Image (cartoon, grey):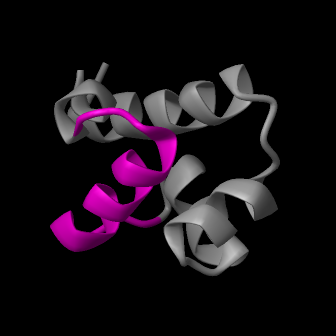
């Protein structure tokens, strides 16, 4: 599996484990829901700063999202 696909799946899984909608995570990470949807669908590769905001909102290290 490509690193990009792993990121997409890991973000989605971490969000779903918390029973959050995309809107919930987007609000906590201060992103637009559409941007988050594109990341989860593999259509957009986030910048490091965006990835850090997502990880912080989820309460996990960035490395966990990249595993």
Quarter in which the N terminus is drawn? top left
Point out the stretch of residues depicted in magenta: 44-61
Q: Is residue 37 magenta?
A: no
How many numbered marks does the figure carry?
A: 0
Question: Quarter-wise, where is residue 3 in the image?
Answer: top left
Q: Is residue 41 left or right of residue 66?
A: right
Look at 50% across and 58% down and name the residue there: 39
* In the image, residue 46 above or below residue 42: below
Residue 16: percent from left, percent from top: 72, 28
Residue 54: percent from left, percent from top: 42, 55
Q: Is residue 35 left or right of residue 65?
A: right
Q: Nearer the viewer, residue 7 or 24?
A: 24
Look at 67% across and 70% down and name the residue there: 27
Residue 23: percent from left, percent from top: 79, 63
Q: Nearer the viewer, residue 40 or 20?
A: 20
Q: Principal SS element in the magenta part?
A: helix
Residue 12: percent from left, percent from top: 60, 35
Q: Is residue 55 magenta?
A: yes
* In the image, residue 3 above or below residue 55: above
Look at 24% across and 35% down and name the residue there: 61
Question: Quarter-wise, where is residue 48 in the image?
Answer: bottom left
């Amino acid at each position: 599996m490509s690193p990009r696909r792993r990121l997409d799946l890991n973000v989605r899984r971490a969000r779903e484990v918390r029973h959050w909608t995309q809107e919930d995570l987007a609000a906590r990470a201060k992103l637009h829901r559409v941007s988050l949807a594109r990341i989860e669908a593999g259509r957009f590769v986030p910048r490091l700063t965006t990835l850090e905001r997502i990880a912080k909102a989820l309460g996990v290290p960035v490395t966990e999202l990249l595993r």
